[in-house]
Amino acid sequence: MEETAHKTKIRWGILGCGNVTEVKSGPAYQKTEGFEVTAVMRRDEAKAADYAKRHGVAKYYSDAEALINDPEVDAVYIATPPDSHKYYALKVAEAGKPCCIEKPMAPSYEESLEIENAFEDKSLPLFVAYYRRSLPRFLKVKEWLDADKIGEVRHIRWFLGKPANAVDLSGEYNWRTDAKVAPAGYFDDLASHGLDLFAFLLGDFESASGTAVNQQGLYTAKDAITGHWFHENGITGSGTWNFGTQQREDSVEIYGSEGKISFSVFEDADVVLENEMGEKRLFIEHPEHVQQFHVENLKADLLKGQRHPSTGKTALHTSWVMDSILDNL
């Protein structure tokens, strides 16, 4: 394949054109100058055809390998459930194409390492869709931290709680709570976003540990997790994720020697800075397609040589943190 650094346009194929690609990500690939979505794939051919028609994509497949090996597809975005990420990613690496994988990178650190090694061995670009690293709301938090607005950072705390939803209570199948696909359930799907963001904001983790149990018995995956960790720079951290609380709550607090920063990972809320100058609250809108800046950073990396903030290497570290908290290593 022609080196991406010498190309002026990159033609993407999307594996798994489900809900996440409808608004969050798919249109961002189409609207980014220099990118084009050439083909999509879904095992249900009728649904693949419907997606392609509605989004103006020229080709659709029901077979993943056909899309991966299509000569008119330069790069592949894997947007399937996590248990299939390794299988498809290794096929993309074998085809010699750059790849972006939905988060989490894989259900385990071991599988994530296999993926990273496959792309590293071929010197192929690998990215993971931890798009919060590219969102202006969280870049403002990083700006405050880098400017020492709260002095020396001491500790970060995150509480995420939400009630069981209708699907949980019904017993209906949901891959997000199937232990064979996502062993820690919603923790795998949601906590990965925050923990990856914390590594971006505060530096890599040195160690992490925790406990995970199933309190409700509604599904096979874990539903209550607690964790604590150290960052390499000595900052301590703690987190609690419970998916059977009475109401939804999503609160992050970063404590420093001279103040505090508060924000939410998922809620549409202000970022708040408190220090000797008083309290500053900012509401920073997310883009219509929340992966827009993430995708624009893919373009900057692949076509302009500017390093993307979320790579296979950074996502591998997040997988290690997740497995360490779940005591899976």
Image (tube, grey):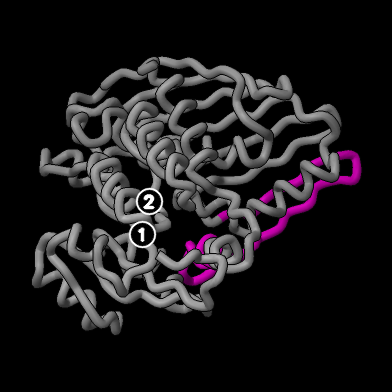
Q: Is residue 11 above or below residue 120?
A: below
Q: Is residue 34 above or below residue 61?
A: below
- Residue in front for this viewpoint, 294 or 178: 294
Whole-percent x, y for residue 97 in the image: 38, 58
Q: In this figure, which residue is indicated by the disc labeled 1?
A: 77
User: Which stretch is magenta?
Assistant: 269-296
Q: Is residue 175 left or right of residue 152?
A: left
Kind of residue at badge 2:
Glu
Q: Is residue 205 above or below residue 84?
A: above
The quarter of the displayed image where residue 158 is located: top right
**Residue in view at x 17 percent, y 77 percent:** 50
Residue picked out by circle 2: 102
Q: Find residue 73 and report its image quarter.
A: bottom left
> What x and y, as percent, mark residue 102?
37, 51
Give the residue furthest to the front.
2
Whether residue 261 is visible, yes or no, is: yes
Q: Residue at x 45, y 38 (%)?
A: 192
Q: Residue at x 49, y 20 (%)?
A: 227
Look at the numbered disc 1 and give the secondary structure of its residue.
Answer: strand
Side of 256 where 195 appears, left or right? left
In three-dimensional space, the C-alpha distance between marks 2 and 1, rounded to whole angstroms, equals 8 Å
Query: Helix, strand or loop at disc 2?
Result: loop
Q: Is residue 286 visible?
A: no
> In the image, residue 132 lies at what x, y percent?
55, 52
